[in-house]
Amino acid sequence: MGIDTIFPQVFRPSWSILPFEESVLWGNRMSPQEADGYPFHHEHNQWLAKKYPFRTNTLSMTEGYGAMSLAWELGGGCFVHTNNMNPATSEFDDDPRYLYLVLAYREKNKWDGQPLLPRLKEWIRYLELMPSCPIEAIYCRATDCRSPKQKHLWLTNMILDKDASADRLTRCYRRYFRATPWNYTDGDGKPYLKLQFKPQNPKI
């Protein structure tokens, strides 16, 4: 157990007659200075927290199910949410080898107008510098957040681009992060995109 694995809990009384509503719960913001005084469960999160502030969060999508992640501040109102996820099962687990980029976005009320992707690339480059880095792969899926199926993501107050289709995002990830289709598929049967990641000091 560590500060990076204590996520807000969604509580819904069994006797409640109110209809279920999607929600997002946020933990306290941890600056690099504050996080330095806490134990971490994952070494890579501890490394990232030396430079990037973060908040834990739980996104409740359906009754009884919530997606938990760490929301890293990339600067200028840009964010990336991460968690360890088994690409074969698409289930979050404790294996540090596979880091899943749950969501990257610009927050409406905080964005400074500068692009997100260079900041995300800098975040990845910093992770590549980690001593004895346990991560073997960073991956994601290209999701059209404008779709009503993804409206739970709107709770982050993200900016919705008019032309951010899944196909356009895939092309963007391939060009900017040299992402390639992986031999693991998501719940829709589409290959995950594996981003180029070359740790300088991989864990042996």
Image (cartoon, helix red, strand yellow):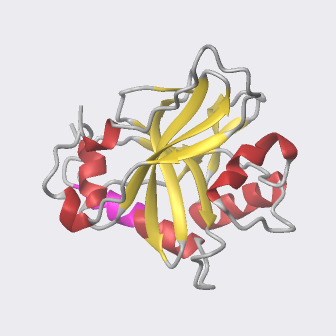
Relative to 115, say whether 163 is above or below: above
**Is 103 located above or below residue 60 in the figure?**
below
* Whole-percent x, y for residue 90 in the image: 58, 26
Task: State the extent of the magenta-drawn residues as a range.
Answer: 124-130
**Residue 200 visible in the current orientation:** no
Compared across the picture, whether 60 is left or right of 8 comes to right
Please say whether residue 146 is one of the residues in the magenta stretch: no
Q: Quadrant of residue 40?
A: top left
Is 161 drawn above or below residue 67 in the view shown? Answer: below
In what quadrant of the picture does the N terminus appear? Answer: top left
The answer to whether 204 appears left or right of 136 in the picture is left
| Dominant secondary structure of the residues highlighted in magenta in the image | helix
Q: Residue at x 42, y 65 (%)?
A: 123
Residue 113, percent across and down? 63, 85
Q: Is residue 12 left or right of residue 108?
A: left
Q: Residue 57, percent across and down?
A: 48, 45
Viewer-closest of 193 and 31 = 31
Identify which residue, 89 or 193, lies in the foreground: 89
Residue extending furthest toward the left: 37
